[in-house]
Image (cartoon, rainbow, N blue to C red):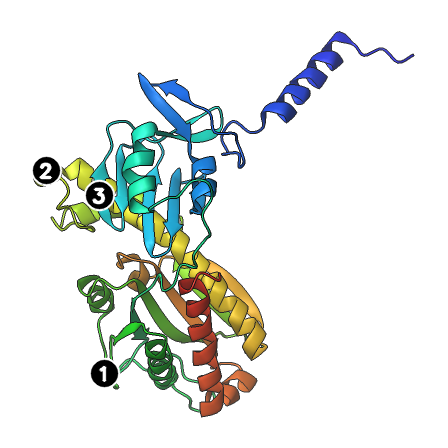
Amino acid sequence: MYLMTKNARRIFLVFFVLALSGCATTPKPGVPTVTYNLFGTTYLPLVPLCDAAGISWQYDAVANTVILRKDARQVNLRLGDKLVLVDGAPQQLEYPVDIYRGIIVVPARFKEKILDNVFKAVYPRAAVVPEFLKIKKIVLDPGHGGKMPGAIGKGGLREKDVNLDIAKRLKKLLEAQGIEVILTRAYDKDVPLAKRAKIANDTNAGLFLSIHSNANRVRKLKGFEVYYVSPSLSDNQRAASAAETGRLPVDASSLAGRPSKDLQVILWEMVYTSGRAESIEIARAICRDAERNLGVAILGIKGARFEVLKKANMPAILVEVGFVSNRDEERKLKNGFYRQQIAEAIAQGVQDYSGGRS
């Protein structure tokens, strides 16, 4: 008979306990609704409450944030904070959202104040209604223009012309979906990078979508790719810089008085972190439709420190529709029918995300 050593038994016991308890830092779905006493008040596990009310939830373990969605409503939470964003407007809780024994927990009052009120929860589980039109306004940014032609193909195709044509086609398609669309340029002119993002910020757009055509010295390279603001760009640093402007990223009418600088930084950081997560989901939806409808190689969804993206205060992506430096793709991009197909693929991706099908 095989006998384990004392050390072997200890190691086995540790793994057995870990297997039973699960990860201490990742929320566990399907946890029974029980109560906990923290900070001198009653707390409830968040996930079962959301599941019972048909509320979708998304947890980012790196940023320690949670996004709750149902119909057209959205709530942003951050572990350890009393502040929550309800459809972009800050609300203060008496006790913070937290994580306990690997489970995200919320104060009992949060259920009454947010879940039952904002989401109009009905218990037991209500039918989930599709989240129609998460994005109601989009700023389309045709890259380059004027004296800035962008990349130029061997056959003379100019990036700025491709970008503008696709953007105009895309505008019509998105407007047919009921989305308001604003162009950063509607004709051949140069628009400074900072102004492009400012247009989106000033109009309170739900998405900033910049359209570009790629180029590379390796002329065999071709394909479709989408960029979002790189995680290497600190949301906290961006938030601190944005707070210096004195502007607020949300409607703060529910707060008493003007928020302090620290509170403004927290608000900005939540907006930026949430925006990155949504940007990635939108990028995924667009890439899926581009691969399916265009038959192009998808080079990936990548983080980048593009100035035009990091200045935007909402989800922001930059789409590279193809390589003008590649002979085959330059030929395709010269074709109006192919440009229409690109516009349709992007519009379908936006619709899949905005209509809750991503």
Residue 300 visible in the displayed image = yes
Q: Position of residue 198 (x, y in %)?
A: 20, 64
Residue at image point 33% right, 57% down = 72
Quarter-of-image position of residue 57: top left
Callout 3 secondary element: strand
- Name the amino acid, label 1: Lys
Q: Compared to 136, does 333 lie above or below?
A: below
Residue type at tag 2: Ala
Comparing 188 with 167, the one in front is: 167
- Residue at the spot of label 3: 90
Q: Position of residue 187 (x, y in %)?
A: 25, 86
Question: Taking 182 as reference, is 129 left or right?
Answer: right
The residue sitting at 42% across, 91% down in the picture is 156
- Judged by depth in the image, the label closer to the viewer, 1 or 3, is 3
Q: Quadrant of residue 2?
A: top right
Name the residue: 38% across, 67% down.
318
Q: Residues within 10 Å of mark 2 (few under 14, many from 20)?
A: few
108 and 28: which one is in front? Answer: 108
Dot 2 falls on a residue whose secondary structure is loop
Residue 250, percent across and down? 20, 50
Please, is residue 201 above or below residue 341 in the view?
above
Q: At numbered mark 1, what does the secondary structure look like: helix, strand or loop?
A: loop
Residue, disc 2: 256
